[in-house]
Image: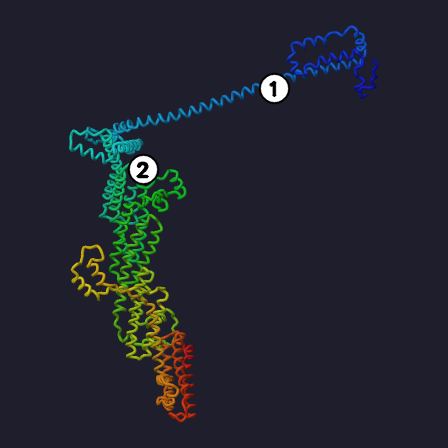
Amino acid sequence: MATTPRKSSSTHVSYESYAPRSTAQVSRLSRIAALTAGPTAMAFYEESKTEDSSSSLLKAMSPPPPSASLTNNALVQDPSVKETMKRATHEADHLTSLLKHTTSLKLALRASINIAEDISNRHADLIRHSGELSAAADRLQGEQAVLVKHAEEIGMPLKHYDAVDSIGVLVGVLFKGKTVVRGLAKIKVDNDEFPTILDKIDDAANFFGRECGGKEVLEAELKKQKKSSNAQISGNIEYYRRSLALQEAALYLIREAVVDRISTTATQVASALNIPKVPIAADKLEASLIYTRYHGISSRSNRLLALVRKRLHHGDAYHELLQLCRTTYCSSRESLLRATIRNHMDKLKDQHGLVGMTRLAAVFLIRLCTVETALYLDFFGEKKSDTKEEEGSKTTGEGTAGGSKTLASQVVSDDGSYYDSEFQSYLSNLCSALHRTVRRGVVTVLDLDTLCQIVSVLREERSMASSSPTTVAAARAISSVIEDAQERLIFCATNALTREVIRFKATPADLDYPDKLKAKPEEEAKEGEPMEDAVQKQLQVYESWFPPMRSVLKILSKIFRVVEPRVFEDIALQSVQSCTKCLKDGAIYIQKRKGALDADLFLVKHLLTLREQLSPFDIDLRSVERQLDFSDAGRAVSRFLANRNRRLFSMTTENALVTLLREGVSINEESVDSKRDLEEALRQACNDFIEHTCISMASDVLGIVGQQLELSNEALVDAKFFEANKIKAALTKTSELVDAKGGEMTTQMKLYLDNPATQSILLKPIARKITKSLDGMRKGVDIAMDGTNGWDSEIRAEIITLIGEVEEKVKACVKAIPNRG
């Protein structure tokens, strides 16, 4: 067999050079194929494993046929063929090992798949069985709950029967037939088992009460038993009676530990301090036995009262016990503090007077209410946890354990225990000492300033007391004192107004105007120095006012914002009406003595001042006055007596008595507006002043012009009053009066009215009226014809000149007012 020789180991060898060419090579390759190709088909291998494996191996390992032996020997002699065969054998062995390993992996994977399928099937079975077990467990649990409930229902009466039979000895109660024997209790209220025993008694009482029908049924059975000695009480009713007896005995133990302890403590403290004979000083009150002994028993009492509060829903017995505890506590505290508080009030009044006493006493009562509320909450309030108390002690600092109990911000609890009616009534009784002391002093006070100070001080203290819920009682007491002080203030103010305004009798010195106004400028002129003190100047102006008006403004300024607004408006309404009447009466008196000018200026001055001084009060001064009118009462009585069918007992409108009251008495209502009346009086006074001034200066001119307006132009030419000489004489007289009266008028206005604007406002209508009259006269002069009534061009010119002079003089008076002011 021809082969291509290799040049070197690195030379590339082609596959064609090794292609089988001889019969021996083909035979060898067929044996190799027989050894290597069989296991590739797994299904065929598994089926013919036992049959073909031995034949294939025998065939592969059998020697070649004799005809090919020579050829093989020839091949063996070739080195390259040996090497190739060696490599082929090695690769065949390697492939065989890989095939075996792959086969083992496939078998292992198949086994794993089978195991996984088996596990999945078992898991499904497990889930199914678990669901069945869960349903069975739920069913069993429901059956168990039903059985437990039935067991409890069956055992509950027995439990309550056993409780009633066994607890009697613990609370000191024995039942001998129908008789209940009381003795010493074996259990104490401080025992930890006492709340449990109390719960059992309450549960038994509630159970037997429901079973037998309640206390009404028990009372009915007891009445039957009293009537018939042989009557027997059913089991539930009898045990209900016994449970109530046990409850009463248990509550008696609490009552003995709380109520009797409070009463005993009060007696011991009163005996030790000799109360009420020796009152305690106010500055030592909080450190005395009155508080220390009660703080000592507060913790135990609070714990027992907490048991009572938690069981209030179990019956009226707990309510009655809690009410008894509160009543006993409040009465004992009041007996210890009453004398001390009253003595302190009297002492403050003696040392500081009524006004100073009200402030100090109010502060003392506010503090007392705070301290008493703290102590009350120690007994009846909700118990704070230890953690909260420790946190509170850390935040407040050292040494505040006792003081913290007296602070309102730390004693007020959310349960609102301090709103109990008994406790608030107790605090009101303590604070009534302030009312008692102040009232005794107020009823003798006549000074309005003192009463106003008392009301102002008490209002400030009331606002402070109302800011805290613990001092509501003090605020109520202060409010009652304020009401009494206001009543006294209103009474004194009304009496003063009646005496100084309504019943005022003016003396000549009171109405000595304008001399009364001239006194001040004369004194200043004598001294030679202007008044520099504004207060003193204002005081002198105040003294120059008419006494009734001065009294009205003084009283109203004092009681303003001290009494209620409606009361103040009513007093102001009456006082303004009376003051206006007094001013009008005074003006009439001055008019008789001094003349209309002074009377009008007096009235204008005081009415202007009154209106100006009332404006800051910002009041309406309106009211509705109602009066009974008996004018038709006689006729109504006559009809009532003449009516024979009176039907006095009828509840309809046909009742004659109702008809008599409806027709015989009527109510007349009248709207009163003092501010409007004041404005009307001022306007009337100004008009009177203008009218009187015009008449005093230009009466002749006004008279002529008035007659002139009544006649026509044709009739005016021949009128006797419109003669030239009469017109000239009237104008000459008017000019002289303007010179004389104008200066006097401006001087008087300056004396009465300090404001130049007011003077100008009053003078302008006067000048306008006189000027208008002069214009009318000028028109008449123009109408007059020469040759009639003494008219000619010369005298007409003189009269026109006189008219202009009078106008200039009148206008000069008006212009001079601001410079004079």
Q: Residue 652 in the image: state x and y as whole percent.
A: 22, 56
**Residue 698 seen by the camera:** no
- Left-right relation of 746 to 39: left
| Residue with the mark numbered 2 | 310
Under circle 1, the secondary element is helix
Amino acid carrying label 2: it is Lys
Tell me if I can see residue 29 in this picture. yes
Horizontal arrangement in the rendering, residue 120 relative to residue 53 (left or right) = left
Q: What residue did someone put label 1 on?
A: 109
Q: Name the residue nearer the viewer: 647 or 632.
A: 647
Residue 410 occupies quadrant: top left
Residue 267 falls in image quadrant? top left
- Give the numbered dot on residue 768: none
Q: Is residue 658 above or below residue 408?
A: below
Q: CA distance from mark 1 to mark 2?
A: 75 Å
In front: 69, or 293?
69
Question: In this rendering, is residue 39 above or below 199?
Answer: above
Residue 16 coordinates in the image, percent (x, y): 80, 19
**Residue 746 image position (x, y, % from top left):** 38, 79
- What is the basis of the colouring in this image? rainbow
Q: Is residue 113 left or right of residue 726?
A: right
Sort mark 2 into few (<14), some (14-19) or many (20+) by Cα contacts within 10 Å: few
Query: Does 796 sit above or below residue 130?
Result: below
Q: Which quarter of the figure is the C terminus placed in? A: bottom left
Q: Residues within 10 Å of mark 1 (few under 14, many from 20)?
A: few
Count of numbered labels shown in the rendering: 2
Q: Amino acid at mark 1?
A: Leu
Q: Secondary structure at mark 2?
A: helix
**Horizontal and vertical percent position of residue 291:** 29, 44
Q: Are marks 1 and 2 in contact (CB under 8 Å)?
A: no
